[in-house]
Image: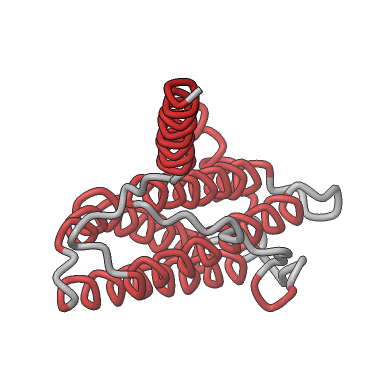
Amino acid sequence: KRFHSVKMKLVYTVASAFLVVLIAQSAYASEKLSAQDYAYNSTCLNHLRSHIKRELQAAVTYLAMGAWANHYAVQRPGLANFFFDSASEEREHGLKLLGYLRMRGHNDLDILPSSLEPLNGKYEWENSLSALRQALKMEKDVTESIKKIIDYCADAEDHQLADYLTGDFMEEQLKGQRNVAGLANTLQGVLRKQPRLGEWIFDNNLSKSMAV
């Protein structure tokens, strides 16, 4: 009987130890690992998170501009296609930044804004030139936002993010900004020479250049 009692105690002890190991392993397995590194700066990445909304709002604004230019009463198909393509580019920028946040370990789920509308709630413009002028201002505001994030993250010693934005984003952003400025200046020049037919001539040339 004494041997049986000792044997049972041993069995209980082993079983208890095994249960403790199982519980510890289960807790370890359920613990989520993070991609956050030593340079992770939550404030810096939250600035980038806020910038995603700016990119997506630019995309929605370009969609509104494209819809306006494509309206039967406006009939500027070249400009409409340009605005629609620009909307796709801004959306792609937002998705790239979202992917970057995930790569760096930013795990919040409420990143995307709950609602979006065009800048200033605007859905129509006086003419093509006014639409391009707003587009240029919008591009400059996006550029300024990126520059501020780069400066902040460089000071916060998150050099990887600062380099990522400087290399991948800033060059593309500046090229897009220059393209919009060039279109606005070209349209202004055509309108000076052809006040009545200037918009049509400009849009027709834009359609041809985009078709190449």
Give how far across and how far down residue 136 sits, in percent: 46, 68
Q: Residue furthest right?
A: 72
- Residue in front for this viewpoint, 127 or 45: 45
> Which of the 4 image quarters holds residue 195?
bottom right
- Residue in front for this viewpoint, 80 or 195: 80
Answer with left or right where residue 98 lies relative to residue 194: left
Answer with left or right where residue 147 lies relative to residue 47: left
Who's the residue at 72% across and 66% down the image? 117
The correct choice, above or below, for 20 with respect to 201 in the image is above
- Residue in front for this viewpoint, 81 or 50: 50
The correct choice, above or below, for 3 with respect to 118 in the image is above
User: What colour scheme has been applied to the protein in the rendered image?
Assistant: secondary structure
The correct choice, above or below, for 3 with respect to 20 in the image is above
The correct choice, above or below, for 178 with respect to 67 in the image is below
Answer with left or right where residue 75 lies relative to residue 169: right
Q: Residue furthest front?
A: 1
Give how far across and how far down residue 130 sits, in percent: 61, 71
Who's the residue at 35% across and 45% down the image? 103
Is residue 212 visible in the rendered image? The answer is: no
- Residue in front for this viewpoint, 52 or 32: 32
> Which of the 4 image quarters holds residue 198?
bottom right
Split into 4 quadrants, where in the image is the C terminus? top left
Who's the residue at 85% across and 54% down the image? 73
Q: How many marks?
A: 0
Is residue 9 visible in the rendered image? The answer is: yes
Who's the residue at 41% across and 48% down the image? 102
Give how far across and how far down residue 33 sits, in percent: 37, 45
